[in-house]
Structure formats: structure tokens, C-alpha cells
Amino acid sequence: PHTIYLKDYQAPDYLIDRTELLFDLKPNATLVTSRLLVRRNPDAVKDDEAGLPALWLDGIDLELLSIAVDGALLPAQRFREEAGGLSLTVDKPEFLLEIQTRIAPESNTSLEGLYLSNGMYCTQCEAEGFRKITFYPDRPDVMSVFTTTIVAPATYPVLLSNGNKVDSGTTEDGRLRVTWEDPFAKPSYLFALVAGDLQYVEDTFTTCSGRNVKLQLFTEARNIGKCAHAMTSLKRSMRWDEEVYGREYDLDIFMIVAVDHFNMGAMENKGLNIFNSACVLASPETATDTAFQRIEAIVAHEYFHNWSGNRVTCRDWFQLSLKEGFTVFRDAEFSADMNSRAVKRIEDVTLLRTAQFAEDAGPMSHPVRPDSYMEISNFYTLTIYEKGAEVVRMIHTILGAEAFRRGSDLYFERHDGCAVTCEDFVVAMEDANNADLKQFRRWYDQAGTPVLDVQDEYDAENATYTLTFHQHTPATPGQEEKLPLHIPVAVGLLGANGDALALDESDSKEKVFHLTEATQSFTLHGINERPLPSLLRGFSAPVKLRFDYSNTQLLFLMQHDTDAFNRWDACQRLALRTLEQLQTQYRAGDVLESPTALIDGFSAVLGHTELDPALVAKMLTLPSAQEMAEQGSEIDAEAIVAAREFVRSTIAGALKSRFLTRYHALDERKAYQPTAEDIAQRSLKNTCLAYLCNTGDEDALTLAQAQFERGENMTDVSAALAALVEYGAEGVAEERLASFYQQWQHDTQVVESWFGMQSSSASFGSLGRVRQLLSHPAFELKNPNKVRAVIGGFAMRNFKQFHREDGSGYEFLADQVIALDGLNPQIASRLVTPLTRWKKYRAREAEQIQGALKRIADSGELSPDLYEVVSKSLT
Ligand code: BAL
Ligand code: ZN
């Protein structure tokens, strides 16, 4: 594999004005005929006097049957098949190119291009899957109008593609034929095709200008009862995008299809979104609140791409965050508007701090706009998505909501129908507001997580309060020197009685400081008492903030901060500090000290009945082992597990009666609704239940047992089951898991969660059990969801068992990654992530993990995906 650089970008030599595709579907011999109207690109770098350049078409795993130019077969000396594609010498600036190829969807296990999932044909073309369907300039800056005809046996009554259906009929030999036309020019990565025996639910949406849009959600017949929530979410998203961004839907129909075998969560193909079943199908009996909320967010995300991604797309894949960062920001704001804003923010920041910060500090560290890659599939990362969204959020914070909207209006208007860059986005934001984001741009090309050290000084005599900030970003691979960033820091001050202090004469209680230098001080006047600062409110920038709070101050912020996010953050800081101290005690062989400050804090939080229960649940949730690992300079897995288990069980024991009171007060019998209020109530109730069961006391386990047996909704059932599996006796856990499987074995999504619950359980998910799950009849190595549930659940969410001191967890993961690479390189390369951070572990683990990685490297020819990650990790 070779490295591709942003600096080498060149506009395409040829454009494709029209693309007509004909698919004759057969599992092992699908014929794909393409008719492409090709035209020399007037904007290409050129020297046509020396002759027209060759036309390069990408193509992988294709059997070339014929090529014709303007109706005549192209002689063999005018084309050459090479690794990765086809080079043609045509010597005309404009021509009709017809190519016929044969492909085998049935044997396509990579799930890129055209493949079969449970007998249904479907496609995944982003980023570079279209080249597995036919020879084509498979790059996002080649935008074309597509017409697609699908011919298939009558056993595939539903034949779908992008755009509007313009024709249908039957062929002479009785097969079905349907033609779709998409009037919006698009890159090949947004192409989609589906063929299957599917049912659908239908609804309509009237757009702000009064057009009626047909909405259809397709799935296999057995899942038809699980579509309502996604449909509601879609309609809410369509309305929200009109109201908040002024974006109206543009085709007559919008379709979603649920597919069981899918590498990603979902895909925003124009007018025909394809979804991983787990990210779209839900019913109260089968899906948890978390799944309901995930579905709402992903439906919104894919829908929002219709503008941020499809109407305005990326010039090249280095610009991926242009559409992903912006769209994640849009979907996060949508979810915040639909649910608890603070809780949504807490969840997103937790993911960022746990996984994106780790990515930033690891061997795959890259900027939001990378400058090189080997395999673009490896760059669908937390940095591109989540940090990219934080960058857009900071622009929103710096400019303000109205100015941001002016900027997005200009961006969409200026670039509609074009393939553009992150720079174009920033320029639109500047131009619409006469703003200067020159220094801010560094966020796009500087990798790594900035560290912000803060000191304060109170001058009672002059009633001034000064905050001094020092920023620095650690070096990352290939980027030794870092420059100061423009960091917006939202700040509030609390007085001794807990009230918010006025920060200026206009009585504002919050201010955003704009840091632009390595060290910078800001002084506030008229501060008549020594305040307690609430810093980086709402996590106004993706940085690590360090301020020397005392435990008492953190407890005070937990009680009084008006910023809900920082209230939670104070709790996290206290917990992380406590856990770190306990790790030190554990390593020194000392007796572990009871975490009294944390117990006091949790006790006060539990007593706060007027606080949003969802926020309380978040405050009572300890940082995960992964997050703890990310904090320290060297990871000692054993000490992390010991400290965390000790704190949890000590809190559970000390506050048992408080947890019990809250549990009973929240345990109302009522019909399931996925409303923010009910979800909040269930989340706190089940947080209490988990702590109660953590005591191991019989009465607590009986409560869980009763909740499990009541079977009211999957949220409560699976929370009870998880508690029994984690804290109940082994025999009890096995029995409940078996009865649960018996009841739900027909339901793919429930079985996937059942797998995940076991493999991620610290007490139950031993390597032996995980191996047994791999031989379970419902497990399929070819299904990414099952792989993520069992192998991912173990390697990414079961810190204790994965890091067993004999290193067997690492060896197991290496074996699975090697086996998967031959089937599905994207999944193999994602799954190897836990092995890539070996340098951060203690010597023994580091050596074991590095050994496992080396074994993968030496196991034979790796896919480009896996090669890139493994080789960079071993460097
Ligand atoms: N574009 C790939 C899936 C997503 O981010 O929506
Ligand atoms: Zn996306």
C-alpha cells in the first residue's frame, strides 16, 4: 500500500456528465453495464497540445467483459488493466463510454460495493466501494447525474435506487425491471441499490414550501413492527432542518432500508439511506432507551447529510470532516433539542475524552483534516467525526447562533451542487459575518489534544479576579511543533453562597474568553468576594483542562453550578482523582482508603430530587476503566480494575438505603414511552439497581430478578439481566441468560445485545466464555454486528478480562483480527485498535501487546486497511 497526500491533489482530468447503469442481478454473476458521458475537465491542470491524457477508471475485483467508445469496441491496445483500475486512451475530449463488467455479490464478504445480506442485494459505496461495482472515476469531485435500471427475478419484488422511480415493467423472460433517476448530480460514493423481498411502512411529510414527500422504510417482513420510531425520528429531523437551518428536502421520495450485514451505522446515499438494522429497528419490547436514542440520532444524521454531504459534498477524502464534523454537530444539536441538552453533551464529551483523546495520543493520531493516508476507510475516526464536530461547535460559540446561521446559509447557497473543502466552509463563515477565523483554522491541521493549565488570583483590595491560561499541545507523529490555537473558554463564577456572580456591569453571569496565545491572562473587575471559577462550561473546547480544585470546591460545584455540564464534570473530576489515589495505594500494596469525599458527593446528588434524573444518573456513573486509562501517563490495567471495583462496591455499601429509596420512588408502572422524561427516570432507576446489586445482597438481587421477570420493556429487562450477570451467582446468571435467549432467539437485534452483555461483563465474560460464544449457532464471523458484540465487547468494553495478566486476551484478539482480515478488512482494522496503544502500558503488558501486533504483522499479506494501522502502531 502507498501513501496518498493532500498536497498531491489534482482536479480530475475528465468529468462524467451522465451515468446510466444497468444491473442484471445474479448472486454470482451480476452483469453491470455502464454508459458514461465523458468530457474533458476544463479546470484540469493540462497540456493538451501534447495529446489528451489517459482516462483513469478505478476498479477492483471486476471481470471486464467489454469496452466501447461512441458505439465501437475499443481495441485492446487502447486500454490497460492495472492494479486498482483501468487506463484508457481515447484521444477525444468528449465521448460515450460503454463498459460491461461481471461481479459476484454472493462472495463479497468485505461489505463494500454490491453484496448480499440475508438474500437481499445491497450496496455500500462510501468511501471507495463503487469501484467494486464497475470501472469509474471513483472520487468525490466527479459528480454525475445517475439513471439506474435494475433487472431481477420476481423473487426480488422490491428494486430500489437513488432518486425518483421513472419506469417499471417486466422483461420478456418474466423478470422485473425498474428504472430510477436521480436529478441531483452526485459522486459515486452516494450511489445505492437494493433488491429484495421486503415490506415497508409508509408516511408522508409536507415540506415548508408545501411539497408532499413520500417516506418509506423497508425491512424484512419479520421486522415490520419495529419501524415506527425511526419514521417518527425522520419526520422530526426533516422539520428541525427546516426550522434550524432552512433546509428543505428535495426529492419526491425518501427511503430507508434496514440491512443486517453492515460495516457502519448507516449511509446517507441520496434519497435511499441504507441502515445497519441495529441503528433503525426498535420496539419497546426489543430495544433499550439507549437504542431508541441512538436511532433518533442516526436517522437525523443521515437525513441531515442530504444537505451537509450530498448537495454540498467533499472535494477529496482529506475533507471528510467537512461533511462528517458538521453533520455530527447538527445531529448533536437536534438530539439536544429533542432530549436533555446537558445529558447529550455529557455523553458526547465522555466519548471524546475516552476514545478521541486516546486516538489523538496514539499512533494513528491525525488532524481533523489529515494530510495523508494509506487507506481512507481507516479515517472514519473519532477525530474526523467527534473532534470535527467540536471544531464546528467552537465556530458556533465564537460567532454566536445567528451569525453561524448566516454562515451556513451562505455555505449552502455558494456551494450547492459542488465538491468543496473545509477551507470553503470556514471562508463562508467568515464572509457571511465579516469575521476573522485565521488562527482558528489551525484546529483543522494540528493534531493532538491541547492541555490548558489555569491559575487564578484574587485581589480583594481592587476587587479584581484574574485567570491565567497556559495552552500547549503535545507532539504527535509527524507534528513535533505545535502553535497556539484559538480556544474559546466559557467561564462563570460562583460566590460563597453558591450564587452566580455578575462578571461585568451588564450583569452577565457567563463570559467566553478567547485564548489565542500560549499564555494569556484575563482580569474581571468588580468581583467583591473570592469566587470559585466554573471553567470551560459546556465543554466549550476539546481540551484537557487542569485547575487545582480542592475536593471541597468540587463538591461545591456539584451542588451549585448553574452549568449542568460542569456540575457533572466536577463529579467526574472528584471521581477520577479518587480513583487515581487508590491506584497508587493499590500499587504500593497499601490498604485502600474509603473514598469519603466521593461518598458525600454521591449522597448529596442522590438526595437532589429536583435535579433531572438523567443528569443524576450520569453524575453517579464512575468514569470507565478506558477513561481512567486515558488519564494517567502509564496504564496499569490491574490497578485500574482494582481501584474502580473498590470504589463502586464501597459506594454501593455505604449508600445502599439511599439507592433503595430512589429506586422505589422511580419504579412506576406505566406504559413504555421513549420520552426524555421517562428515559431519564429509567436511567436513574437502573443506575440505582446496578449499585444495589453491586452489594451482592440477596434482597437487591431479588429486586433485579423481579424486574427481569416483569418484562415490561427491554430497557428494564436488560438492565436487570446485566445486573444479575455481573453481580449474581454464576449459576443464576447462566440460567437467566439461557431463558432470555430462549425467548428472543428469533430477534437478531436482541441476540446481538445478548452477546454483548456477556462478553463485556467483567465477572462473567471470561475468555473461555467468549470463545464459547464464538461457537454459538447464532454467531457469524461474517456479520460485523456480531463481531462487534462478541469480540469488540470483550476487547473494547471488558477491561478486566481482556487485560488478564497472562496476555491471553491479546493473543485471542490477534487471532480474530487475522481471521477477519481475509473476510472484511474494514472490520479487522477497527478491531485491532485496543492493541495499538501498547506503548502506554506497563512494560509487561506493553511487551505482550506488541508481541500480538507483531504476530499479526507476520501473519501473511495484510489488507491495506490492517497494514496501515499495524505498521503505524509498530513504528
Ligand atoms: N458517511 C458514512 C456514514 C455516516 O457518517 O453517515
Ligand atoms: Zn455521517
Image (cartoon, grey):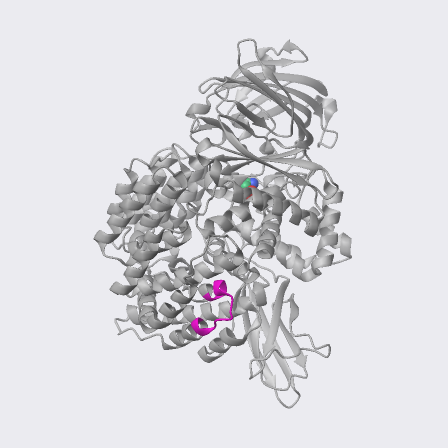
Give the image location of residue 826, x and y in percent: 45, 38
- Nearest the viewer among 93 and 421 is 421
For residue 314, side relative to residue 783 (left or right) = right
Instruction: Choose top left, top right, bottom left or bottom right for residue 748.
Output: top left
- Note whether 410 is above or below 622 in the view shown: above
Tell me the magenta residue range.
Answer: 606-616
Is residue 611 magenta-colored?
Answer: yes
For residue 737, side relative to residue 536 (left or right) = left
Asked if residue 208 can be seen in this view, the reply is: yes
For residue 550, side relative to residue 730 (left or right) = right
- Nearest the viewer among 163 and 372 is 163
- Note whether 765 is above or below 745 in the view shown: below
Asked if residue 128 can be seen in this view, the reply is: no
Instruction: Choose top left, top right, bottom left or bottom right for residue 16.
Output: top right
Identity of the residue drawn at 29% across and 44% down: 812
- Note whether 138 is above or below 352 in the view shown: above
Give the image location of residue 557, x and y in percent: 51, 75
Give the image location of residue 672, x and y in percent: 46, 52
- Note whether 525 is above or below 371 in the view shown: below
- Nearest the viewer among 656 and 519 is 656
